[in-house]
Image: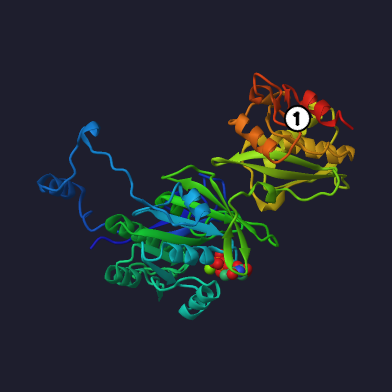
């Protein structure tokens, strides 16, 4: 029998090496390589023999003209939790594997239990837990007032035994909580190690594809933001949903990080209460903090993550630094982008913030990844720096270029409509995003700008 080989896999990016080394060459991370036992495939006895074997097989895949292949439209089932369906891309696809990641305690187990209950008789579910006892899960279900009748549960961590039960029970949806607790008999490594997580997930993916069962995998997230265990999990599954939220806030955002069956960055918003997760179907207003008066250091933007525009508040605090190397801290935004924006502000906005500590935060614990946040971030920073609030009912969005130009962003009109609908009066936007015919949308006055300087003048002109 061929011997098992050992490979070394980076837990951040999934790159593989034949020998251990201190730094991953692919992503530059240090100390992330760990041993992974590669089982030799049974058929891999000898390359020549394998090829010969294929030629004699009658069921071997054949090359076909792609046009002659009948395309299949994937079968979808609505979970009937609207925000979850939205993030899944319009319901759960048969045979798909969905990884739900998030910090411990964010509500992953609650979400899956509620999803299985909502699917009910239509798609009977099997909830496999390696973390909680069945009594704990049942107690939660009863407390939330869920209809538990169609749901079966199993407390087990060995993949082989889980699959044995799944083959017997034939659930249409299998929820595994969590992938980090699973282990397979074929590997000697301990549960939670890279090789166990990867191999266990591979088994479940194969099961999903062979039987058409929908599989939900829960994954814990490391401090660095990756799903613990190898990033390779993200390549193996059909969709990766991250559950995010601020500590202390009851709002939770489910974000599609990858989705083979829908838009990425689609957001679903939930509120965690004593009856579990409740949908927030019209979430725009929750990401604005309620200021009684205009406050310095705050700017409202219209972001469009996924397919829905959202009003989001950006807050900045700029303060004289006592350090030689002032701090730049961005929460909910990209750190490097903030450094770049501050340089542009210095050069093209005539604001000397190089000796200031700058802290920027997106209200509500949501993460804004698009460049439309550039302009509102700079306006918030400038407003704090000058200690001058932006005028009331003002929104802004736009990408800021290195030479101080304001660049357009996608779906400008839709963003403006959202702002108008929520009672905003002025919008400072890239020229190409302003409506051609009129400078108003309802009550909303649209101010089109081409350069950062113009945007700053427009924003602070009224006070
Ligand atoms: P849980 O789903 O166990 O999180 P995860 O599986 O991601 O670790 O959720 C646990 C948290 O949610 C816990 O801090 C309590 C809170 N919670 C509520 O506030 N209300 C509820 O109805 C439930 C079920 C949980
Ligand atoms: Mg849990």
Residue depicted at x 44% and y 65% = 116
Report if residue 21 is visible in the image: no
Q: Is mark 1 within 8 Å of ligand 1?
A: no
Image quarter for ligand 1 = bottom right
Q: Is residue 116 left or right of residue 29?
A: left
Q: Is residue 26 above or below residue 416?
A: below
Tell me if 377 is positioned left or right of 153 in this view. right
Total residue callouts: 1
Going by the picture, which residue comes out furthest to the top? 437
- Could you say which is closer to the camera, residue 377 or residue 200? 377
Q: Residue furthest front?
A: 442
In the picture as drawn, the residue positioned furthest to the bottom comes out as 135
Q: Crowding at label 1, few (<14), some or many (≥20) Cα neighbours within 10 Å?
A: many
The residue tagged 1 is: 344
Which residue is at a point 19% across and 37% down the rendered structure image? 63
Q: Is residue 313 or residue 201 the one in the foreground?
A: 313
x then y, percent, for residue 269 = 59, 53
Location of residue 440 (image quadrant): top right
Residue at 69%, 33% (x, y): give it: 397
Give residue 391's position: percent from left, percent from top: 83, 36
State whether residue 2 appears in this view: yes
Q: Position of residue 87 (x, y in %)?
A: 50, 49
Q: Is residue 336 above or below residue 448?
A: below
SS category of the residue bearing label 1? helix
């Amino acid at each position: 029998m061929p011997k098992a080989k050992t490979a070394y896999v980076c837990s951040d990016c999934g790159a593989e090496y034949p020998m251990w080394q201190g730094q991953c060459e692919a992503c530059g991370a240090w100390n992330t390589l760990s041993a992974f036992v590669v089982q030799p495939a049974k058929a891999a006895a000898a390359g020549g023999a394998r090829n010969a074997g294929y030629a004699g097989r009658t069921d071997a895949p054949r090359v076909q003209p792609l046009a002659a292949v009948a395309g299949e439209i994937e079968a979808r089932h609505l979970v009937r939790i609207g925000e979850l369906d939205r993030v899944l891309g319009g319901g759960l696809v048969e045979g798909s594997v969905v990884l739900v990641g998030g910090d411990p305690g964010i509500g992953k187990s609650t979400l899956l239990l509620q999803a299985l209950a909502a699917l009910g008789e239509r798609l009977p579910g099997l909830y496999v837990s390696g973390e909680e006892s069945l009594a704990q899960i049942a107690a939660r279900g009863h407390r939330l007032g869920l209809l538990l009748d169609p749901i079966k549960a199993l407390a087990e961590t060995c993949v082989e035994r889980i699959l044995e039960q799944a083959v017997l029970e034939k659930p249409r949806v299998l929820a595994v909580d969590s992938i980090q607790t699973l282990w397979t008999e074929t590997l000697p490594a301990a549960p939670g190690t890279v090789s166990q997580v990867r191999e266990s997930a591979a088994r479940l993916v194969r099961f999903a594809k062979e039987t058409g069962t929908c599989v939900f995998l829960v994954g814990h997230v490391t401090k660095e933001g990756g799903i613990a265990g190898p990033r390779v999990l993200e390549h193996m599954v059909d969709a990766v949903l991250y559950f995010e939220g601020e500590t202390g806030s009851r709002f939770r955002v489910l974000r599609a990080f990858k989705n083979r069956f829908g838009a990425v960055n689609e957001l679903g918003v939930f509120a965690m209460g004593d009856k579990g997760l409740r949908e927030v179907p019209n979430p725009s207003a929750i990401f604005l903090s309620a200021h009684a008066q205009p406050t310095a250091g705050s700017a409202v933007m219209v972001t469009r993550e996924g397919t829905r525009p959202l009003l989001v508040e950006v807050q900045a605090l700029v303060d004289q630094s006592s350090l030689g190397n002032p701090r730049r801290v961005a929460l909910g935004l990209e750190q490097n982008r903030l450094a770049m924006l501050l340089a542009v502000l210095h050069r093209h906005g005539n604001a000397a913030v190089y000796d200031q500590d700058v802290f920027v935060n997106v209200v509500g614990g949501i993460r804004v990844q698009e460049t439309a946040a550039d302009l509102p971030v700079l306006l918030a920073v400038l407003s704090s720096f000058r200690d001058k609030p932006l005028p009331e009912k003002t929104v802004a969005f736009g990408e800021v270029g290195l030479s101080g130009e304001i660049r357009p962003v996608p779906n400008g009109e839709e963003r403006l409509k959202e702002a108008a609908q929520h009672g905003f009066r002025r919008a400072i936007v890239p020229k190409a995003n302003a409506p051609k015919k009129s400078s108003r949308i309802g009550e909303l006055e649209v101010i089109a700008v081409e350069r950062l300087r113009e945007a700053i003048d427009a924003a602070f002109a009224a006070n």
